[in-house]
Amino acid sequence: MTTPAARRIRWFLAAPPQVLLALLLTAVVSVVVLAVSELAAGRVNQTRAEAQSLNERATHVSELRQALVQAESGQRGYLLTQDPRYLQPMKDAAARAEKAFVNLQASSLADHAALQRSVEIVSLGNRKLDEMRITVNQAEQGRLDLAMAMLKGGFGIQLMEDLVGRCNEFEHQQLAALRQKQAAISESLLQQRFGVGVVVLINLGFLALLANMMIRQFTLREQHRAELERQAGLLEQTVNERTEELSALSTYLQTSSEREKARLARDLHDELGGILTSAKIDIGWLEGHSKATDPEVVPRLKRLAGVLDEAVDLKRRVVENLRPSLLDHLGLGAALTWYVNDTCRKANLKCALRMPDDNESVPAEMAIAIYRIVQEGLNNCIKYAQASEVNISVERTQGGFRLRLSDNGAGIPGFRAEHLSHGIAGMRQRARALGGRFELRTAPGGGTSIEAFFPLAEPAARP
């Protein structure tokens, strides 16, 4: 049994080299597309990660600047109004600024230059927060004049301007780098799409070439199949014609054989019967005239008369085998009854025979065919079946006559309908020659059954 893997290997070995080359090139291009896509995806992911870091740093710087501005607003509001309500917003803004310090440094760890700038901004931010806390503490302790002097001294303003400038510069750098990364991502995606498109076009070209070759192969295969079907049809037609010729020849030979047997039987009955009868009469005359002259001749004449009786009986048996006289004179029923009963009696075989009514007329050709099939089937039953009982029936049906013959024997071992013995093939041919059907069923230990149907020709319609 051939495995699927073996069939695929045989298909590949049988495929044309052009098809294998197209398949190989398509596979190589597909692998290249996969490798290029993976490399481009890796670069895009890396660029996206860098862009995300740049965006986070710019966001943290913006949050830091905004928090310091809000904290400074709270500081100035408290120093100018002495209203404690300005202190809580300042503290919240300072807390957000310190959180932004940590986030900014954490997002800059992978970039040495960005980390250095972040450290500078964080240092300035801490100095600004310290300056705001010092002035607020002095005002809370009653030294408002000293706090206002420090505020008016311009140190905090200069520190804030320097911090805002550095934050703006750093933010602009990060946003510019972010735009470059985004442009690089877009360019990489565009290149990837272009590369994939080119490779897909190449693959489509290979596939089109492969499809063209496959279509040609399928077309050639279809033409070859059509040619094989045509040749098979011609061969089948030739076989049918030869089968019909052989069937016609077999029918002709069987018919000729029956005619020849009938002629020979008549000749033996008429000529040889006449000769033997004359010899019998002459021997009877010699017996009557030899008693007085030579008594020793009488025993010899009696032996000769016995030999003539045996010759007459042999002639009768030969004539009956060639052409049963009962079939011609009394019909199929009488001929089959005598033959079946006599044969089964000699073979010590139990027999059941059922025949149609005596007024049923069976055509001569059909009668001899039925008789010969019964003769062949009964001989096979006696010789090979080892049966103890046989059932034979001939019945008149609506369209013709049906013959059934069955036994309780051993059956036919290894029987195959396509390989029939000469005797069974002859029985089937006799049925087919008259337009009938022949069927044989057998099973090991289950006996053998023969059924033949002989149709009657429909009577011609009256004008």
Image (cartoon, rainbow, N blue to C red):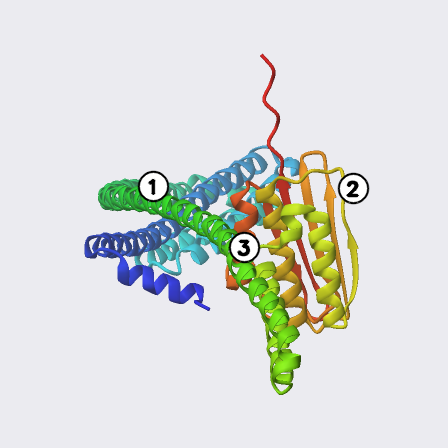
What residue is shown with label 2? 357
x and y, in percent, of residue 105 in the image: 43, 57
Q: Which circle, 3 or 2, is nearer the viewer? A: 3
Q: Which amino acid, mark 1?
A: Leu
Q: Tell me what residue is drawn at x 76 percent, y 37 percent.
A: 359
Contact (Cβ within 8 Å) of mark 1 with mark 3: no
Q: Decide if residue 173 is in sight here.
A: no
| 196 to 42, vertically: above or below | above
Contact (Cβ within 8 Å) of mark 2 with mark 1: no
Q: In this image, 223 relative to 107: left or right?
A: left
Q: Which circle, 1 or 3, is nearer the viewer? A: 3
For marks 2 and 1 on the same chain, the one whose residue lies earlier in the sequence: 1
What residue is shown with label 3? 270
Q: Secondary structure at mark 3?
A: helix
Q: Which amino acid, mark 3?
A: Asp
For marks 3 and 2 on the same chain, the one whose residue lies earlier in the sequence: 3
Asked where in the image residue 182 lies, by quadrant, the reply is top left
Q: Residues within 10 Å of mark 3 (few under 14, many from 20)?
A: few
Q: Relative to the observer, which residue lies in front, 325 or 274?
A: 274
Residue at the farthest top position: 463
Asked where in the image residue 8 lies, by quadrant, the reply is bottom left
x and y, in percent, of residue 208 in the image: 25, 41
In the drawing, what numbered circle is on residue 175? Answer: 1
Q: How many circles with numbers are drawn on the protein?
A: 3
Q: Tell me what residue is drawn at x 55 percent, y 59 percent.
A: 274
x and y, in percent, of residue 255 in the image: 48, 48
For marks 1 and 3 on the same chain, the one whose residue lies earlier in the sequence: 1
Q: In this image, 314 relative to 227: left or right?
A: right
Distance between the alpha carbons at the discs numbered 1 and 3: 134 Å
